[in-house]
Image (cartoon, grey):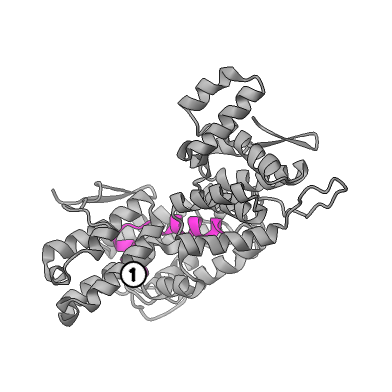
Amino acid sequence: MAQTTTVLSGFIRADAPPHPERFIDTAALRALDPKALISDRVTKDIRASVLEYEYSGEWGEAQDYSLALTELLKKSSAAKDQSRLLQYEEILLLCQWVSYPFLIDIAERQLLRLHLLIALENRINIRKKFLDRLTLEAAPEAVHPVRLGFINAMRANTELIGTEKIKIKGIDDFQQPSIQNWLSDYEQQYSQEEGRAAIEEAGYVNNGQNASHLSTRDRGALLQLLKAYDFLFFPDLQQDVLPMTEAPSGRTYQARTPSEAQPQIQASGRASYDYRAVRAQAQQLLRETGGNEKRIIQSLVSDLQDGSAVNAMASLLLLAQLRMLDNVVAGEPRFQSMVRDDLKKGGHDDMVQGLRANPRAPQFLARFLSIALEERLGLLSYDALDFGSHLASLLSLKGDQYARLVINEGGKMRWNQ
């Protein structure tokens, strides 16, 4: 069945993406005979397998996949076939897009400046990639320069959407339909000061004179481009929660943001913490694990056993940044046992059945965090709750039910357990 795409009111509706006839994971790819890379069927399955990682959210796997494919290409005669090599170079670019939140800054901007079209054509949600990437920046002041770098890279992209030249307001001659020129024309039509969202995006694509010459596929790509671009300028209008303070346009927005924790030194002798050190360690852990959930949770298990506060808190922070923290009780039997034992100790036997039925419930996550941070790591109650509020702000991107892991009642914080 042919794939269909319809642009309607600012959204793209499409048939489900095709799955590979044979899913080739990283282990299978490494074991593949290099000669197989010249096969059309294998090439198609490898490409589809990369996109499977995108749809399943396994970003870290895409990084490993890229390394394995690169090594395999060095041993294959496919590298001597220019046409085939171009196909695999495109697949490697797709790997980078799937793992976009984990790329270094230079690689992020280079993809946006040189290879944005491949993501748009393969229906990779650029706007969500931005959201996932910016979520990794726990400090509000760190978000602004990242977003500004993304905007400037997109404005410099000369890839073409469509074939007919376009007319830009204020310029006499028709211009190439480059991403750079589409964005320039869009900003001439709709100013930053008034704000832009789905109505403006759909209006430009569906009713604009320049876009009227585009094919349905190209209009879909243009719409996704505008949605991603506007997200960087107007996060509040996109109904996403991000730790942001000021848009590149200079406008200030109110958003739910984690407060910067201040180290607390008290006479009790119990541990305090340095949030900046925790954040730095989380970034290091991200590089080491590639964002693999099982590896991060295993690191958390080890660090809780050792009582390593900074490392354990870094694992918790990274899980929250990747929106995996809600899986921590359900995914690790030892953590579930910690919560169950604490419930029984507190005389809450009636809640044990609820734990078995739904270990991802916010109240059980809050209880686990209180045990891990206060009992296992020895943090002051104030510090544990403050750090818990950081985690809640990040995890609330996955669902509002997690926004109240910590409750503030008249200036007094407590765990919502």
Q: In which quadrant is the C terminus drawn?
A: top right
The residue pinned by badge 1 equals 67
Q: Work out whether residue 399 or residue 173 is closer to the camera in this orientation and state it.
A: 399
- Residue in the foreground of this view, choosing between 155 and 396: 396
Q: Main secondary structure of the magenta part?
A: helix
Quick check: 372 left or right of 168? Answer: right
Q: Look at 45% across and 73% down and name the residue there.
A: 107
Q: Which residues are magenta?
A: 116-136
Q: Could you tell me residue 381's position as x and y percent?
A: 76, 41
Residue 149 in the image: state x and y as whole percent: 53, 71
Say above or below: 173 vs 277. below
Q: Is residue 74 above or below residue 366?
A: below
Q: Would you say residue 403 sits in the magenta stretch?
A: no
Residue 90, compared with residue 197, is above or below; it is below
Give the residue furthest to the top.
350
In this view, the residue in front, 74 or 57, is 74
- Viewed as shown, does residue 185 lie left or right of 177? right
Residue 296 position within the rendered picture, expressed as x and y whole percent measured from the top left: 50, 52
Q: Secondary structure at mark 1?
A: helix
Residue 107 seen anywhere in this rendered image of the structure: yes
**At label 1, which amino acid type do we have?**
Leu
